[in-house]
Image (tube, rainbow, N blue to C red):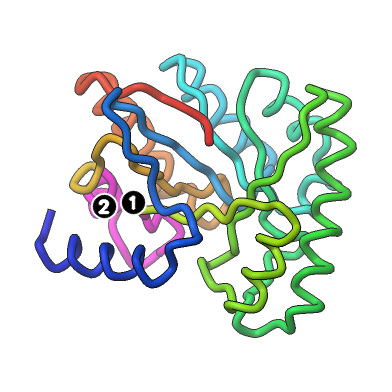
């Protein structure tokens, strides 16, 4: 883990201290997260990998995908994983007005809340901005609504089709520490790297006695 990466991440955390970047603890807990689902076959493959390791994770879902694949979405909840809001249309906050962004989050909330209440009777108030891009005014509005904004300290970059699957794996394993929030994507675009990296990351976490927690 390079000094430059540690220093840069520390500065970012201080500048945006109202966002949650990691969850430090003394119990070797880590937090696996998956963005952009639910996606047919891919999300179900992820769930099977997690099941094999008795691992729980947090899924930041897109509203339009929730409406398209409600059975996969409710399966995520029923087997004990956590759900978060990822906007309805995967909006880039830097290219969106605060009003439009807030409305899109509310639209996603409508999609996920009804199904969550049916499946578990628990309402979700965690949010991750697509691309990690969100304006200060948008963040202020979201926080005022009671959301926690969840970022990350370990990015797999599985979505990046210019990197090798080995690089994707290294991106994760080289930076994991207790409290890390790790980002994968249960999407078609990411699957080539995800299919290779996720099983090996899960093996690594087990071998090093990490404990899986949801956010």
Residue at 57% across / 56% down in the picture? 149
The secondary structure type at the circle numbered 2 is helix
Along the viewing direction, whichever of 10 and 58 lies nearer the viewer: 10
Left or right: where 38 falls relative to 67: left
Percent x, y of residue 202: 34, 28
Magenta stretch contains residue 36: no
Residue at 75% across / 73% down in the picture? 101
Left or right: where 73 falls relative to 174: right
Label placed on residue 175:
none
Percent x, y of residue 43: 61, 36
Percent x, y of residue 14: 34, 66
Residue bearing the label numbered 1: 154
Label placed on residue 171:
2
- 80 w.r.t. 162: above or below: above
Residue at 33% across / 38% down in the picture? 179
Residue at 34% across / 53% down in the picture? 153
Badge 1, how many Cα within 10 Å: few under 14, some, many 20+? many
Q: Which residues are magenta?
A: 155-172
Mark 1 vs mark 2: give the one in front.
1
Along the viewing direction, whichever of 99 and 143 lies nearer the viewer: 143
Left or right: where 66 falls relative to 192: right
Along the viewing direction, whichever of 194 and 9 lies nearer the viewer: 9
Along the viewing direction, whichever of 202 and 210 lies nearer the viewer: 210
Magenta stretch contains residue 166: yes
Decide: marks 1, 2 in contact (CB < 8 A)? yes
The secondary structure type at the circle numbered 1 is strand
């Amino acid at each position: 883990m390079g000094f430059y990466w540690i220093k840069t991440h520390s500065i970012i955390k201080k500048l945006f201290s109202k966002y949650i970047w990691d969850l430090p603890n003394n119990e070797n807990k880590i937090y696996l997260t998956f963005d952009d689902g639910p996606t047919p076959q891919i999300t179900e493959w992820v769930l099977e990998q997690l099941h094999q390791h008795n691992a729980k994770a947090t899924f930041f879902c897109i509203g339009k995908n929730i409406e398209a694949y409600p059975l996969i979405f409710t399966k995520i909840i029923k087997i004990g994983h956590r759900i978060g809001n990822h906007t309805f249309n995967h909006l880039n906050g830097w290219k969106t007005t605060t009003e439009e962004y807030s409305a899109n989050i509310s639209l996603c909330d409508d999609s996920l809340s009804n199904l969550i209440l049916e499946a578990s009777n628990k309402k979700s108030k965690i949010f991750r901005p697509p691309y990690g891009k969100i304006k200060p005014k948008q963040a202020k509005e979201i926080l005022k609504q009671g959301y926690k904004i969840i970022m990350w300290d370990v990015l797999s970059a599985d979505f990046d089709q210019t990197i090798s699957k080995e690089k994707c794996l290294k991106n994760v394993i080289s930076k994991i520490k207790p409290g890390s929030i790790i980002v994968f994507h249960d999407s078609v675009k990411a699957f080539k790297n995800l299919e290779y990296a996720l099983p090996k990351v899960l093996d690594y976490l087990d071998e090093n006695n990490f404990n899986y927690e949801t956010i």
